[in-house]
Amino acid sequence: MNSQQRPCQLAVLVSGNGSNLQAIISRIESGELNAKIACVVSNTPEAFALTRAKTHGIPAVIHQNNGYTSRKAYDAALVEILRGYEVELVVLAGYMRILSEVMISAFPHAIMNIHPALLPSFPGLHAQQQALDYGVKFSGCTVHFVDCGTDTGPIILQAVVPVFQDDTDETLSARIQAEEHRAYPEAIRLFTGGKLLVDGRLVRIQS
Ligand code: GRF
């Protein structure tokens, strides 16, 4: 990491627990990631991730759906919030809303998501249970850039875990989450270091 470089300004968008947010905070606080979380934005006031943000002195913003006539109108207001914090990279971490093209076009190749399966298998909700029901022997997580589809954007990193015969949704999810907490900070580190080149569907990692 080049310590002379200004930290990359992140926004982390959440709806729930925020264990991935916590992993990113830890890597920043330990100096492994040259980034600053400019704000955490939740679409619900109940997200525990908001408490995590406040504990670490990070601005925590609640941006609810009330009063917006469309997804685009909601996202336009979200873009304004993020511009206000001079955000360079948007990190979706358990954010339970689909982004409209308003957000996608405002941050081209600068929105990441993490999905708890090896995409393109098992997109959408309940990915771990989908994997169990299908009977796969390996699953994992995928960090990808976000496009207008559901979990369809160019893949940055993947991590693989075994699936055991006696796994439940909970045991498999826990095994995948341990990998998420390594893969997401690593993908952000590559982005902040200017190492990710998007070439159509391919994300090339520069050495
Ligand atoms: C993770 O499993 C992630 O893959 C999915 O949402 C979950 C968020 O977990 N997109 P947390 O809120 O970061 O603990």
Image (tube, grey):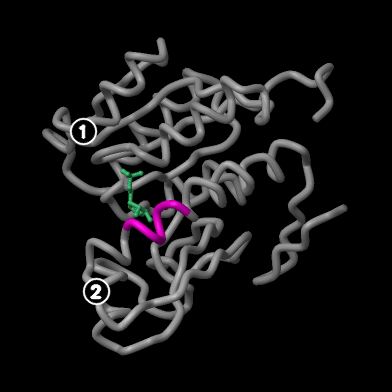
- Disc 2 and disc 1: Cα gap in Å? 23 Å
Q: Between 180 and 147, which is closer to the camera in this rendering?
A: 180
Contact between marks 2 and 1 (CB within 8 A): the answer is no
Residue 164, x across and y down, in percent: 35, 78
Identify the image quadrant of residue 173: bottom left
Position above or below: 94 against 68: below
Residue 62, x across and y down, in percent: 24, 25
Other-residue count near label 2 (Cα within 10 Å), few / some / many at <14 / 14–19 / ≥20: some
Three-letter amino acid code of the residue under disc 1:
Ala
- Image point 67% across, 40% down: which residue? 189
- Image point 72% across, 60% down: which residue? 198
Residue 151, x across and y down, in percent: 42, 66
Instruction: Give the residue at mark 1.
Output: 47
- Image point 33% across, 56% down: which residue? 174
Instruction: Give the residue at mark 2.
Output: 129
71 inside magenta stretch? no
Side (left or right) of 183 relative to 114: right
